[in-house]
Amino acid sequence: PVIMVQNVSFRYSSDTFGIDLDTRVALVGPNGAGKSTLLKLLMGEVTSSHRRNDKKAVACQDWQLELDLSPLEYMMKCFPEIKEKEEMRKIIGRYGLTGKQQKLVRWPEVSGVFRLACMLFLDEPTNHLDIETIDALAEAINEFEGGMMLVSHDFRLIQQVAQEIWVCEKQTITKWNGDILAYKEHLKSKIDKQTHDI
């Protein structure tokens, strides 16, 4: 694995797991279970009290779109070596993005934000996105050639991009033996049982 975590402890039980460059994992579980904290541990933003986290050849790229810029201005800023706006318009046009179709959700894919990264760590990336934009994000993620770990409650996105489901709850991480729709049914049954028991 390019990232190996052994006996990590941060309000988790001691868990050991590895993430490879072809890993496509959705980390699911209840709010407050530690999903985002796990991502931060993996990216080195927080440290565990007892951790051995070996990172091998992982390039994490932190990016944020500047929504006050037009798509053309954004691309000009990302690629300062291209001086002429007309030249940039031609480059953008090669990706089939013209006029009103130039949606900022496509810029990570087009501008190469993903090109230098080996792993994507995505924490609730669909907050405040409409269905069309979620689908465009899923398409960009699926075109990315590295590994991906996603924290999300968005079953639509998870179904499109995740090959594995890991459940974070009760201070542990468990691989779910099924897809996200089976997990959704499991949650529904669990809620129905809790409601029935009341």
Image (cartoon, rainbow, N blue to C red):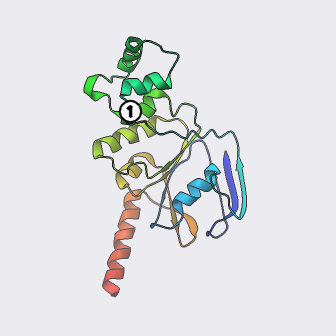
Image location (x, y in percent) of residue 190 = 38, 75
86 up-or-down from 138: above or below:
above
Q: Secondary structure at mark 1?
A: helix
Q: Is residue 170 left or right of residue 196?
A: right
Disc count in the image? 1
Q: Depth check: give the residue in front, 157 or 49.
A: 49
Q: Is residue 194 left or right of residue 168?
A: left
Residue drawn at x 43%, y 55% is: 152
Residue 50 makes an appearance in the image = yes
Image location (x, y in percent) of residue 101 = 28, 28
Quadrant of image for the C terminus: bottom left
Amino acid type of disc 1? Arg
Residue placed under numbered mark 1 in the picture: 106
Q: Depth check: give the residue in front, 167 or 96.
A: 96
Q: Depth check: give the residue in front, 71 or 16.
A: 71
Residue 1 makes an appearance in the image = no
Image location (x, y in percent) of residue 107 = 41, 31
Q: Residue furthest bottom?
A: 198
Residue drawn at x 26%, y 27% is: 100
Label 1 environment density (alpha carbons within 10 Å; few <14, some 14–19, many ≥20): some
20 up-or-down from 170: above or below:
above
Q: Residue furthest left?
A: 100
**Residue 41 appears in which quarter of the rendering?**
bottom right
Image location (x, y in percent) of residue 117 = 58, 36
